[in-house]
Amino acid sequence: MRVLVADQTSDKLLERLRGGGLEVDYRPGIPRDELLKVVEGYEVLVVRSRTKVNREVIDRGTRLKVVARYGVGLDNIEVDYAIKRGIAVINAPNAPTRSAAELTIGLMIALARRIPVLDREVKAGGWPKGKYVGRELYGKRLGVVGFGRIGRTVAQYAAALGMEVVASDVVDVSAEAAKIGARQVPLERLLAESDVVTLHVPLTPGTYRLMDDARLSLLRDGAMLINTSRGEVVDVDALARHIDRLWGVALDVLPEEPPRSERLLKLLSHEKVIVTPHVGSETYEAYDRLAEELALNILEAVKRV
């Protein structure tokens, strides 16, 4: 079978696929018009978040048997339509868990201690000792919205820091929460009572702009908000109206990646905002796990088609 890898991945993935007997064409960054021309020649398509696998791509890929996402989320793939066409859609949900959770904790600490602002001022020749007094995380309440793999791992790390953890999810996660000394509460209560709120939900119609003006209004003054899930989960226009009363916001994901609109760039330039370019899974360790997990899943999938 022929495999088209349309986005940048690790050499380890390519080696594992070729070692499994697949013919792999590695074309990271392939333009969409070119993808539409050549996809009909492949049984397997591997993408990251850049490439949108919509109906047009699926219809052109008349030989496609497998669409694989090098990562966790599947929001750039029309999953239902692909399955309807008999195409298996797979990902690697476990690999980035620890890396994404560690980034979340890192952003939390950076917000609490104003690390980016201090770093910037010292490098500019200043010495802002005493200008920005930070906050400890010990004893603070962390609200985890979405208690899946990453949310649970963040909760474990936060508990080790001495934080009280509460969780919210659309399903009953009370047993999983109790294992680490956390408890499940309704979303609105979590938002109103937490010192730090961190988002770990997939992008679905139900989570699109989950954090709208009404829910952002529930956050207490001086609260911190962290989003390492999907950019569209937060209404950034509403966030801009609340940023001044919050302690700070950390965003690893944005509704525009990279950001281009003036309104979004203005928000990101605020001194209370920390932004990173969607790097939750970008560690060497996660890449290795991702390559192994996805290669195994692809090889297993092609055996069944």
Image (spheres, rainbow, N blue to C red):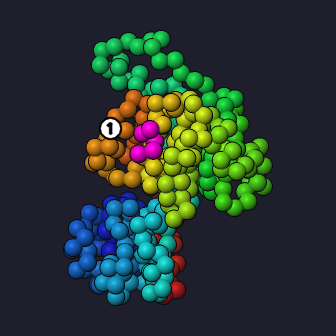
Question: How far from the left and from the top, in percent, is residue 219?
Answer: 59, 38
Let me know if residue 286 is in the magenta part.
Answer: no
Q: Is residue 35 left or right of residue 298?
A: left
Magenta span main SS: helix
Q: Number of callouts in the render?
A: 1
Question: How far from the left and from the top, in percent, is residue 120?
Answer: 35, 24
Residue at (40%, 50%) from the top-left corner? 254
Q: As displayed, is residue 274 above or below residue 155?
A: above
Q: Is residue 195 left or right of residue 229?
A: right
Q: As displayed, is residue 127 above or below residue 44?
A: above
- The residue identified by callout 1 is 266
Is disc 1 placed on a helix, strand or loop? helix
Residue at (78%, 55%) from the top-left corner? 175
Answer yes or no: is residue 261 visible: yes
Q: Which residues are magenta?
A: 237-241
Let me know if residue 239 is in the magenta part.
Answer: yes
Q: Is residue 234 left or right of residue 141?
A: left
Q: Residue flagged by tag 1: what amino acid is it?
A: Lys
Question: How far from the left and from the top, in percent, is residue 305?
Answer: 48, 87
Q: Quadrant of the N terminus?
A: bottom left
Q: As displayed, is residue 94 above or below residue 268?
A: below
Callout 1 crowding tier (Cα within 10 Å): few <14, some 14–19, many ≥20? few
Question: How far from the left and from the top, in percent, is residue 151?
Answer: 61, 50
Residue at (45%, 44%) from the top-left corner? 238
Residue at (46%, 42%) from the top-left corner? 239
